[in-house]
Amino acid sequence: MPEQVPKRLRGRPKQTDNDISMQQTIIYTASTLFKEFGYEMVTLQQIGKKCGVSKPTIYYHFAGKADLFVAAMTTMLQNVRKITAHMLDEAEHLRDGLIRLAEARLANPHGEIEMMMREAERLLEQEQIHAIREAEHQIHDVLASHFKKAMDEKIFREEDPLFLAEAFSTLMLMGNRVHDQQKYESHHVMAEKIVRVFLKGVTTS
């Protein structure tokens, strides 16, 4: 599925490179503020001030705060998907790729996205919620494709690969709890343990 590009209003000229660069700056700034303060506490005025643009400039690129929030969330999730795909594609063995991925996710917990979603969900339209969840689902699709390959090679036992992808993602959420992190000397050690437990449950040997 192609990456989402925020809609332009009818009658506007085609976006220039400067427009796209400004749009990316606004999305990055909004992402930072949403992660720090949550959806409701952040205003378009704050976002504009932080990235040095006026409120009308934000409205030139986005229909409103909800539209900008969706763009920020889907951009973050698309970046996670790209990193996930790169780590797994480049790894010599699936186990190594999963450890690298788990270590990266533990160092940058995914839970803040869920917290933002819980807060914002009641204020978003169903189409907007679906766009964010679809971006999240694409991360699971990447994992599922590698797990399916492991099944075809008889490394993993037969199972629903998407279920395994969601299960592995859930294990990585342990990094959201400070107490769990403190029990291990490093993210790498914790990542190795998560992957070891996961693989014991899915491998054929």
Image (cartoon, rainbow, N blue to C red):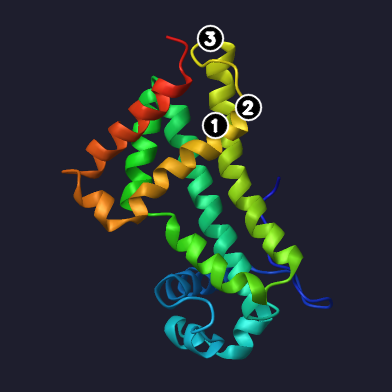
Q: Taking 48 as reference, is 90 left or right?
A: left
Marks 3 and 2 in Cβ contact (< 8 Å)? no
Q: Distance between the Cα atoms at labels 3 and 2?
A: 14 Å
The residue lying at 27 percent from left, 57 percent from top is 178
Q: Quadrant of residue 161?
A: top right
Whole-angstrom CA distance, mark 3 to mark 1, is 15 Å
Q: Are marks 1 and 2 in contact (CB under 8 Å)?
A: yes
- Residue 28 in percent (x, y) is at 48, 68
Inspect the image, locate mark 1, and give the three-letter code of the amino acid beneath it: Leu
Specify the quadrant that holds the C terminus: top left
Q: Of tags 3 and 1, which is closer to the observer?
A: 1
Q: Residue at x 69, y 58 (%)?
A: 131
Amino acid tagged 2: Asp
What label sits on residue 154 in the rendered view?
3
Q: Is residue 167 left or right of residue 7?
A: left
Residue at image mark 1: 164
> How far across and down, in percent of the image, does residue 130 sit?
71, 58
Q: Which residue is under mark 2?
A: 160
61 and 181: which one is in front?
181
Q: Amino acid at mark 3?
A: Lys
Q: CA distance from mark 1 to mark 2?
A: 7 Å
Q: Position of residue 189 (x, y in %)?
A: 23, 36
